[in-house]
Image (cartoon, rainbow, N blue to C red):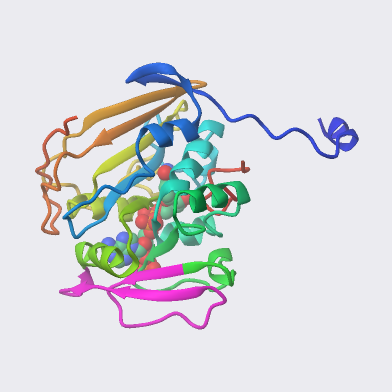
Amino acid sequence: MAVQAEHNPSPEPERPVRLRRLLPPGDPATVAEIVEQLGLWQRPVSASPLPRVLLNMVSTVDGRATIGGRSGPISDRADRELFHGLRTAADAILVGAGTVRTERYGRIIRDEERRRLRAERGLSDEPLACIVSGRLALDIDIPLLADPQARVVIVTPSPASLPATAAHVEYVRAEREGHLDLAAALSELRSRFGVQLLLCEGGPHLSLALVAAGLLDELFISLSPRLAGGEAASGEALRILAGPELERPLELGLLGALEYDSQLFLRYGLSDRACAGGSATGSGSVAGGDSEERSPGASG
Ligand SMILES: NC(=O)c1ccc[n+]([C@@H]2O[C@H](COP(=O)([O-])OP(=O)(O)OC[C@H]3O[C@@H](n4cnc5c(N)ncnc54)[C@H](OP(=O)(O)O)[C@@H]3O)[C@@H](O)[C@H]2O)c1
């Protein structure tokens, strides 16, 4: 309560949540322990010209990716901890301009402890912030772009540039037949910026583009214990993927499941980048298997 807080100027930090490990079964674990167990700090030698790509999204049980136009209202504490835990181990974050605009993205990692952890693992202070945009209609007052400490890459098919920003901004330009060539862009993120582990944080249009291009390796989906209804066709009822229907549904293999306070955290693998080639033709096979909101702008 507020009164107690006034009498306690330096309250104990909240203890990290411990999630129940359902698959593979095990003792409850913190997000830090889970990130460690998933091997996300490791950078195995790979002949692939592309980074390993993870997508992290949250959805209500009936499939809503937003309520009131934001993901915050469907996110709970464990989801936020996982969101920031995954960020901490990534080389770069990939996010669509729509999400950056709506959620007013800020600095990727502000928490000193997380930055220290990254340094210990030989990573830069924070992941590179990669914003995907066709129109470059980005307000330079968005906290991320207004932060002189931030390192941002704009991924675009366009030859245009943003007006001068406080953030350090570079460009990955990858165009094919008037559209963004996501595979070429990701390949450049790997070769030019050394990105080996890329974490996509949505939104739904970018997520579908990644899936349709066969570029996604793993999906982390938090199932929020809520039902929200809403018209599927309206923007208000966005699901985690938005855009043209895949020619065939992509099949996923369940790699892991966690639970905390009725929220399920599922990790799925896409076995091969089977529908690679850029068209929305899903032909994949089954894989072998601190802050106030989920708001990406929130400190982590
Ligand atoms: N539930 C969740 O986990 C979650 C996660 C993230 C976001 N969200 C929510 O999703 C909503 C935003 O949805 P959204 O689908 O519009 O977001 P989005 O995918 O982040 O943004 C779409 C915009 O990103 C750019 N873009 C994406 N893919 C592109 C491509 N292949 N080529 C060129 N440009 C591309 C375009 O930017 P330009 O318009 O600049 O050309 C496009 O208009 C927000 O309400 C946010 O809160 C939910």
Residue at (47% x, 27% y) in the render = 226
Residue 24 belongs to the span the image colors magenta: no
Residue at (49% x, 62% y) in the render = 101
Image quadrant where one finds the N terminus: top right
Q: In the image, residue 265 lies at what x, y percent? A: 40, 29
Q: In the image, residue 288 lies at what x, y percent? A: 16, 31
Q: Which of 54 and 202 is in front in this view?
A: 54
Residue 159 belongs to the span the image colors magenta: yes
Q: Is 56 on the left or on the right of 85, as rendered?
A: left
Q: In the image, residue 211 lies at what x, y percent? A: 22, 49
Q: In the image, residue 74 lies at what x, y percent? A: 50, 36
Residue at (31% x, 82% y) in the render = 159
Snapshot quadrant of residue 177: bottom left
> Ligand 1 quadrant?
bottom left
Magenta stretch bounds: 152-180
Q: Look at the image and tell me whether residue 28 can be seen.
A: yes
Q: Is residue 261 above or below residue 253?
A: above
Q: Is residue 283 above or below residue 139?
A: above
Q: How many marks?
A: 0
Q: Nearer the viewer, residue 140 or 119?
A: 119
Q: Nearer the viewer, residue 100 or 89?
A: 89
Q: Look at the image and tell me whether residue 97 can be seen.
A: no
Snapshot quadrant of residue 222: top left
Residue at (64% x, 29% y) in the render = 15
Q: In this view, does 212 lie above or below 141?
A: above
